[in-house]
Image: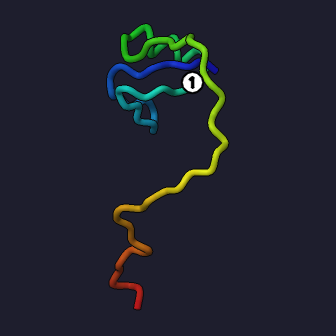
Amino acid sequence: MKRIEILKTFLHGQQKFHAGEVRYVDEANAGYFCGLGWAKADDGQTAAPSVAPVTLVVQNGTLGIASPEVK
């Protein structure tokens, strides 16, 4: 797996890659995306992911989908 930074928003298969994201993709796709100028290789050192607990604040959520079939 290779770490890349997405430069342009694009679709590849069923996945959407957004500009500014850092993603891990296989070597072949990394070369393809970088070759087209859609991404750049991010070979810098990365810190280990944080394992500290986090709190999520849901701004607007629903528990179900209204349907005329459900009564």
Image height of 30 relative to 9, above or below: above
Residue extending furthest bottom?
71
Colour setup of the view: rainbow
For label 1, the SS is strand
Residue 44: x and y, percent? 56, 12
Q: Name the residue at 63% across, 34% down.
A: 49
Residue 5 occupies quadrant: top left
Q: Quadrant of the N terminus?
A: top right
Residue 61: x and y, percent? 38, 67
Q: Residues within 10 Å of mark 1 (few under 14, many from 20)?
A: some
Q: Quadrant of the C terminus?
A: bottom left
Residue extending furthest front?
52
**Horizontal side of residue 53 vs 29, given as left or right:** right
Q: Name the residue at 45% across, 33% down.
A: 13
Amino acid type, label 1:
Val
Residue 19: x and y, percent? 35, 27
Residue in front for this viewpoint, 24 or 10: 24
Image height of 46 relative to 71, above or below: above
Residue 53: x and y, percent? 62, 51
Which residue in the structure is indicated by mark 1? Answer: 25
Q: Give the number of callouts.
A: 1
**Horizontal side of residue 29 vs 11, given as left or right:** right
Image height of 37 relative to 63, above or below: above
